[in-house]
Image (spheres, grey):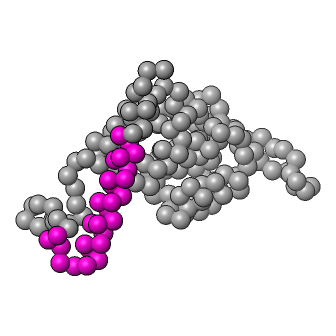
Amino acid sequence: MASGGDLTLTILGFLNESPMHGYELKSRLAALTGHLRPVSDGALYPAISRLEAKGLLERHEEEGAAAARRQVLTITAGGREELLRRLRDPADLDISDQARFFALLAFLSALPDPADQAAVLGRRLAFLEAPASFFHEGGRPVRIKDEPDPYRRGMLVVARASSRAEKEWLHQRIEELNVPR
């Protein structure tokens, strides 16, 4: 993962779902974002130690499947509060970076208040609705029809389709969250 911010969020998010040992946690992290941003042991285990030092998670030993004992990680009440804080008020990068936003989205259901969930989705929607492009010329975004390079044009076509699909889903989900219960 690119930084400690999203690694912290995903560690706390997975441990909020259930206690697990480090190897299981690493496997879940790899399944979520490993194809984009692999997590090395050199990043994961120091992050776990930092979270433990801050009182956000704790370790205890349990019997392993074989004779070896294993360290099991459990989120603490403070860790749960930190997770909810990060979900409720994510950093701007957590909203603008797609991989980080998807990591956030994977745990957004942990927020108990639908209004809080809708507010986070609204921030992502506002980001996607702002004019943007990978390429600029003369201070203006290059439009698909004006891009001569077929690969850059392809990037713009794929980004537009992905953005449209995500905005459609965001509008739908925000509407569902805003229905009185």
- Is 134 left, or right, of 31 in this rendering? left
* Residue extent of the magenta highlight: 145-171
Front residue of 54/154: it is 154
Q: Residue at x 58, y 32 (%)?
A: 80
Q: Is residue 130 magenta?
A: no
Q: Quadrant of residue 153?
A: bottom left
- Chief secondary structure of the magenta span? helix
Residue 51 on image: x %, y %: 59, 42
Q: Is residue 57 above or below residue 146?
A: above
Would residue 122 be found to the left or right of residue 61 on screen? left
Measuring 33% from the left and 65% from the top, which residue is drawn there?
Answer: 158
Residue 78 x %, y %: 59, 29
Q: Residue at x 59, y 41 (%)?
A: 12
Residue 62 screen position, x and y as percent = 84, 44
Q: Is residue 151 found inside the magenta-colored segment of the image?
A: yes
Q: Can residue 120 be seen? A: no
Q: Position of residue 29 (x, y in %)?
A: 60, 55
Residue 52 falls in image quadrant: top right
